Image (cartoon, rainbow, N blue to C red):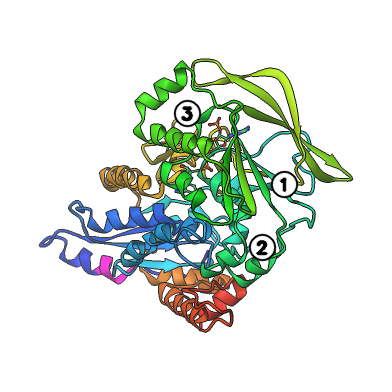
Amino acid sequence: MGGFGGPPARSTRSETVRSRTPVTRQLRVAVVGAGPAGIYASDILTKAELPEGFESVSIDILDRDPTPFGLIRYGVAPDHPRIKEIIKALHRVMGHEDIRFFGNVDYGTDLKLDNLQLFYDAVIFATGARRDRDLDLPGIGLDGSFGGADFVAWYDGHPDVDREWDFAPDAQSVAVLGVGNVGLDVARMLAKTADELLVTEIPDNVHASLAKNATQDVHVFARRGPAQVKFTPMELRELSHSPNIDVIVHPEGFELDEGSMDAIRASKSQKLVVDVLQNYLAKEPTGAAHRIHIHFCQNPVEVLGEDGRVVGLRTEVTELDGTGNAKGTGEFIDWPVQAVYRAIGYYSDNLSGLPFDQVHGVVPNDGGRVIEIDGTPLPGAYVTGWIKRGPVGLIGHTKSDAAETIRLLMEDLDTLTPPEHPEPDAIIRHFQTQGIQYTTWAGWERLNQHELELGHTHTHTHTRERVKVVPRDDMVRVARR
Ligand code: NAP
């Protein structure tokens, strides 16, 4: 990479006054990923006490999406406006004078670690996890077998996902595998009516596709018992808030063995979840048009197909073994379903130039300092959030991660190699010479305003808070106007 001649003016001036005043410079940090993990880390960094030698910090947050906020924009369900409120706090951080945003920049394609190290003292990766973890089952590749993360990205209007969802006209019964909060989101979004979701920020194409969704019965399968589910109480309670949905907990497999009682005693939240499940178990259905069924002790073993399309799911009945785990009984059940959604956890992308732990789907690290698989440190590279500890935990949990990563970065500052091109414009010149159509914070503010206006001028009967722009080119055009 050429075109970055001469040392920055500040170092030249510093040389001449070195004998009288200590040399100070700006700490330059790149954060890859503008989701909550990257923004929390940046916030903590702006407040960190800098060691001698650094007069200030300047942070550039890069994201492959043209927009900031990562999984809050493209992972939180549209009918969860309370969680989306977190954006307000993140918005305040992004407006900080020491932070810049560069969107539509794809790490690994547009630039890599060695490029970034020309411009920054340190690079913090906060790229999260967006893909579905693989599930190796016969039939998993059939038409009508979907990843929950793909469905989430679709209904949240991610630009890189096809506009149309493949709702088969006869898919009245569908299966959801996994009993975490993503499983709940998927089940709820499948069971709600399209019009119920019209008050949310769903894009128009999502509303039009959802209107063709024929689902009446969503069967959610847990491979263990009620005390082992990963739901959180509030999200589980909320399932029944729709007048169009009955939540039906099936008694078969609703077992609480000694291991389950230990789990309930150890966690107030787990106890609350079991209480909510027990309430559902005792409740008579209201006759609502759509039903979410929750089944316990059913381990999915095969997706059944005919002519290349899903026609059923085979599960093996399990029983709890007293330790919190379950074992197969050798009894199998075939469930007639016309679509299967696996919501068994997210998986992170491998990042160019960084080691990757395939088993846990994380970048190997020691408290946030990136290390090679053999434990050798990779100087100047850090991780935080799901890429650091795996795809578990609520959004707020990522703050403590970020605090640890920034503390270690501060400890390392004296040992880091200063960048060759620390001047803030150098990265912009790089984008320009590479023809990268990057977006900025001011661009996001324009796009944000545009989406809010679309909501208010919407032609449906409801005024909507926002209507999301979906195609990448359209977002970039509005942002770069
Ligand atoms: P998760 O909480 O880890 O749940 C994954 C589920 O998949 C578990 O029930 C797991 O069962 C099951 N599973 C894994 N492998 C399986 C297999 N081979 N066959 C059958 N079931 C299998 O993951 P998540 O739902 O993706 O959520 C990720 C994080 O995001 C969580 O911390 C979640 O709370 C958070 N989140 C929060 C919200 C919200 O509204 N607050 C929304 C979405 C996500 P086992 O336990 O038996 O392994």
Q: Residues within 10 Å of mark 3 (few under 14, many from 20)?
A: many
**CA–CA distance between discs 2 and 3?**
33 Å
**Residue designated by label 3:** 227
Query: Quick one: label 2 or label 1, which is nearer the N terminus?
Result: 1
Residue 226, x across and y down, in percent: 51, 30
Residue at x 62%, y 48% (from the top left corner): 291
Residue 202, x across and y down, in percent: 56, 67
Residue at x 19%, y 59% (from the top left corner): 23
Q: Tell me if 93 is positioned left or right of 22 in this view.
A: right
Q: Amino acid at mark 2?
A: Leu
Residue 472, x across and y down, in percent: 60, 70
> Which stretch did the figure color magenta?
8-12
Which mark, residue 173? 1
Nearer-the-camera pick, 124 or 140: 140
The secondary structure that most of the magenta stretch takes on is: helix
Q: Amino acid at mark 3?
A: Ala
| Residue 348 seen from this side | no
